[in-house]
Image (cartoon, rainbow, N blue to C red):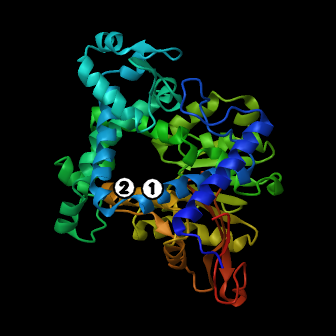
Amino acid sequence: MNNSSHLESLAETISAAAKVISGYCTLDESPHPSLSPDAPSVVLPHTAPEYVRQARQQLLSAAKEALQVAAEPCEYLPMLAVQYQYIACIKWLAHFQVFAAVPLTGSVPYSQLASICSVPERQLKSVVRMAITSGCLCEPQPGEIAHNPTSRQFVTLPAYLGWIRFMTDFYMPVSSQMAEATEKWGESEQPTETAVNLAMNTPLSAFTFITRSREFNKLFGGYMKGVSASEGTAVRHLIADYDWAQLNQALVVHIDGGPGNVCVALAEAFPRLRFVVQDTAEQTNQSRSFLKSQPEAIRSVIEASVYDHCSAQPIQNANVYLLRMVLHNHADSNAIRILAPLVQPLRSNPDSRLLIIDTVLPEPGQVGVLDDALQRYRDLTMQQVFNTKERDLTEFQRILDATSDGAGRLAVQKVRRSPGSALSVIEVAYESYANANGNRNGNGAFQEFGY
């Protein structure tokens, strides 16, 4: 019997995971993780083996849980106060362009940096030293400020500055109105009865409000670029989480596929595949312009086509239909309307699959506390902004069941999520009620892989 405490168990997990990461870095001759100015821009390269990336996720969650276990209950509120001050400091640093004023290599004195940015030196010290405790920037020697890997990204990836601004100027005031929105509208699914309407004093839906606001539209563009470049939504996870190679010369239809960048990445990795990117007329024009900039080998296998996702699917013979980060934008009633046109092609082609790429909320205790928190923050954001939600597996199957044609239904076959990915790949097939065996066990439980 193991008599060690939960805190000791967490410490052992942290130690074991750290040894896995350090061992990999030594064998790979890669720099070891650090917050020093000369540390690499990533803790692990994306080519690191899955067990190493999984160890990093275990370390992160165990470290967060160990902090919670060791903290006194009376320290809970002060720790929350630290979090909002972190956000205030990052906004301040971005507003006064401090990140851009710090040299990418070497350091700069506080006095010189304050002069460059036209800010009081005392305030600069307070803000920077608070930011350092969050892991952003560093002070390699007293009075000298330098970049570390975290702060450097705000210079090398300018879209991250848009992410900061959108988070502080839009998401923060919106989230603060969540209680008031519930008080006023309860369980409403209407896109014009959200915390956005209260925080921004607008009768418009969030999407309409953002697109009509020059300031927020620009910030939202930067935010989306930043999110797209982040680890959690990297397209390489989609490439790894499904067996694309076995499709050979298959046809892939990406519904609401935006500019087509996902299909470009898939085409680069699997040149024998063919693609159709479906979206609105306006987005399709942008997609065609984007695809023209691609090499001929890519352009020749990707077509952009206008399609309303609630209408009959014009392509009935695709091998794979993709819905990536789409359903979470819609309440259940609209999500069902998007799924319904896919029943017929999946029924007609038993080997065809629908891949839903979205956040899948875990059951309590199913994943580490950090992973859990990151997924639930996305769920709350969708609720506060759009009156929609992220879904757990049961909720996904419920909306799939609602598309039943009487003879069968769309059913989840497998779920896969790579370490570090915010999105799961949900593989869906048409399942006849007469042959409801599929990839389910006797009590109807899902087969889950890497989740």
* Residue displayed at 32% across by 63% down: 73
Secondary structure under the numbered disc 1 in the rendered image:
helix
Q: Is residue 210 visible?
A: yes
Q: Eyeballing the image, is 227 above or below 378?
A: above
Amino acid at dot 1: Leu
How many other residues sit within 10 Å of disc 1, few (<14), some (14-19) or many (≥20)?
A: few
Q: Is residue 312 visible?
A: no
* Residue displayed at 37% across by 33% down: 131
Q: Eyeballing the image, is 127 above or below 13?
A: above
Amino acid at dot 2: Thr
* Residue displayed at 31% across by 45% down: 82
The C terminus - image quarter: bottom right
Q: Eyeballing the image, is 54 above or below 21?
A: below
The mark found on residue 381 in the picture is: 2
Image coordinates of residue 259 in percent, x first then y, are 55, 39
How many other residues sit within 10 Å of disc 2, few (<14), some (14-19) or many (≥20)?
A: some
Image coordinates of residue 180 in percent, x first then y, are 18, 61
In front: label 1 or label 2: 1
Q: Quadrant of residue 405?
A: bottom right
Q: Quadrant of residue 193?
A: bottom left
Secondary structure under the numbered disc 2 in the rendered image:
helix
The mark found on residue 67 in the picture is: 1
Q: Measure how far apart labels 1 and 2 are at the Cα level.
A: 25 Å
Image coordinates of residue 59 in percent, x first then y, are 59, 53
The N terminus - image quarter: bottom right
Q: Would residue 336 be found to the left or right of residue 96 on screen?
A: right
Q: Quadrant of residue 170?
A: top left
Count of labels in the image: 2
